Structure formats: structure tokens, C-alpha cells
């Protein structure tokens, strides 16, 4: 099993819907997780971090961490076409190292 | 500066030539990372700096790649005798020590012809 896994997508949702992006991880990474958004041709941008089991909300974004099932999710409410991007899940692997998933491409259809 | 600055933003070079990529991190950020992203691919870790030292160089693809960081600030990634497979976007990121996430620069798009 890869340390951090994501479905590559694309995930297509209609405008105004909830987009749900998922990431699973192995025992080899720690319990600190990050979501980055990467627009085509641009560099990744940190949008959410989550360290504790449960939900963390920031505007239209909610990160969810379930340690028992070893997954972390990002929910985007009221999805907009401007949310169309690749979303990268990253995990802190101890000391200094972050492990990135390969990303899920989200398409929000107007 | 306010963000991570990388230069040049684009570089086209002939196969076999050497190139030098520069990263100027956010002031005060002790951790600095280099990643590579090929078209449509994920992020490939290259090297990590904590201050001026590089405890992990395991991601460097070959001995043609080297990197240094001076004064705990600016870092340069050097690729000698470039090959076509080196073509990619080279991303630099910086952050505080620890698991707080980090900020990426806008990258250098390297094309080897």
C-alpha cells in the first residue's frame, strides 16, 4: 500500500453541490494531514490542515480525519467552477518529511 | 519577501548544458524543500534543508543533481549535463520546522531540448 493514496479522478460535480475528496493513508505516516489545491499550471497552495480526529471547518471547506479508518476527507460546500483544480493530500511522515498523494482532479460544472 | 520566490520562471536549455535554479524562501523559514513535478504527475521529493544542512538527499535522481543552501536562506538546485527527462517544473517550498505545512514558490519550468 502506498503511504498516501488518492483517486485521480476526475471528480465531476454540478455547481452548488458538495464535492467530497478522499485520501487514505498507511501506518507509516503520522496523524497530521494537509490539503493543497493546485490550479492547472500553478503551484500547490495550502488550504487546510488537520491534526485531530474529527472535523475542522474553514468557510466552505471542511476537513475530516478518521484515525480508526485511516482516511482524511475534504468537503467543499456550494462548489463553484473556480474550485476546479487538483487537490493534493499530504501527510507528515515524521521529523521533516511530507508524503504527497498523486492528487484528485475536481471539475465543477456550471 | 512575502512569498517564496523562484527564478527563473522558465528555462529552456540544450541537452548536455548545466542549469542552476534559485529559491528564495520566506524570511525566517528554516525548512526548505525541492520537489519536481512532471506534466500530469504528482510531486516528486528531491531534497530537504534544515537551515544550511541537508539531512535527506535521497530524492535526488542522480549525481548530476546537487543543491546547496547558504545563510539559512537562498537555495540553488544545480543540474549538470541536462537530459530531456529532466524536463519538469521544479518547485521550492519553505516552512517553519515541524508539521505545519509549507508554502510553495511558483516554480521553474525547465525544458531540455
Image (cartoon, rainbow, N blue to C red):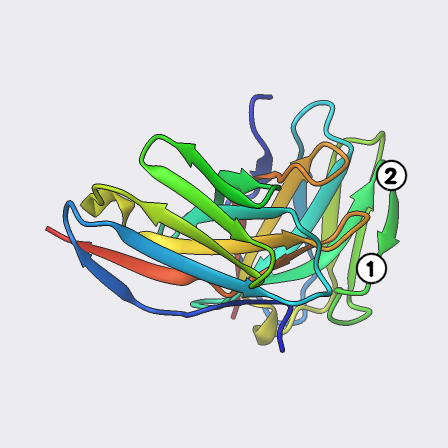
Q: For residue B61, what is the image quadrant?
A: bottom right
What crowding class fits label 1: few (fewer than 14 Cα within 10 Å), some (14-19), or many (20 or more)? Answer: some
Circle on res. B35: none
Let me know if residue B51 appears in the view.
Answer: yes
Q: Are marks 1 and 2 in contact (CB under 8 Å)?
A: no
Q: Which residue matches tag 2?
A: B52
User: Can you give x and y, in whole percent of width and height, for residue B91 in the image?
Assistant: 58, 50
- Residue B92 lies, in percent from the top left, at 63, 45
Extreme residue in the bottom direction: A1
Residue under the image location 35 percent in, 48 percent down: A75
Using the rendered view, name the quadrant where residue A22 is placed. bottom left
- Label 1, on which residue? B57
Q: Is residue B10 visible?
A: no
Q: Residue at x 73, y 45 (%)?
A: B76
Q: Chain of mark 2?
A: B
Viewer-proximal residue, A1 or A10? A1
Residue A35 at x, y percent in the picture: 49, 47
Can you say whether B9 is above or below A8 in the image?
Answer: above
Q: Nearer the viewer, residue A69 or A72?
A: A69
| Picture quarter with the N terminus of chain A | bottom right
* Picture layout, residue B36 above or below residue B105: below
- Chain of the residue where label 1 is placed in the rendered structure: B
Give the structural element (helix, strand or loop) at label 1: loop
Q: How many marks?
A: 2
Considering only vertical position in the picture, is B79 above or below A84? below
How far, Cα to Cα, is label 1 from label 2? 13 Å
Query: Residue A34 versus residue A68: which sits nearer the camera?
Result: A68
Sequence-first disc among 1 and 2: 2
Horizontal side, residue B91 vs residue A8: left or right: right
Crowding at dot 2, Cα within 10 Å, few <14 / some 14-19 / many 20+, comes out as some
Amino acid at each position: 500500500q502506498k503511504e498516501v493514496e488518492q483517486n485521480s479522478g476526475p471528480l465531476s460535480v454540478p455547481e452548488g453541490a458538495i464535492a467530497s475528496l478522499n485520501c487514505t493513508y498507511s501506518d507509516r505516516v503520522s496523524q497530521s494531514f494537509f490539503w493543497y489545491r493546485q490550479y492547472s499550471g500553478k503551484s500547490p497552495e495550502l488550504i487546510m490542515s488537520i491534526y485531530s480526529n474529527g472535523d475542522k471547518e474553514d468557510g466552505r471547506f471542511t476537513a475530516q480525519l478518521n484515525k480508526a479508518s485511516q482516511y482524511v476527507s475534504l468537503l467543499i460546500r456550494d462548489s463553484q467552477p473556480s474550485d476546479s483544480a487538483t487537490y493534493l493530500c499530504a501527510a507528515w511522515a515524521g521529523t521533516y518529511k511530507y508524503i504527497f498523494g498523486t492528487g484528485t482532479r475536481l471539475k465543477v460544472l456550471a | 519577501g512575502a512569498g517564496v520566490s523562484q527564478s527563473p520562471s522558465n528555462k529552456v536549455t540544450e541537452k548536455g548544458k548545466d542549469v542552476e535554479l534559485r529559491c528564495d524562501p520566506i524570511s525566517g523559514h528554516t525548512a526548505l524543500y525541492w520537489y519536481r513535478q512532471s506534466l500530469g504527475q504528482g510531486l516528486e521529493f528531491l531534497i530537504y534543508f534544515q537551515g544550511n544542512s541537508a539531512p535527506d538527499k535521497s530524492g535526488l535522481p542522480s549525481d548530476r543533481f546537487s543543491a546547496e543552501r547558504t545563510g539559512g536562506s537562498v537555495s540553488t538546485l544545480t543540474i549538470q549535463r541536462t537530459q530531456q527527462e529532466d524536463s519538469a517544473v521544479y518547485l521550492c517550498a519553505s516552512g517553519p520546522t515541524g508539521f505545519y505545512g509549507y508554502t510553495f514558490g511558483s516554480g521553474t519550468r525547465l525544458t531540455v531540448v
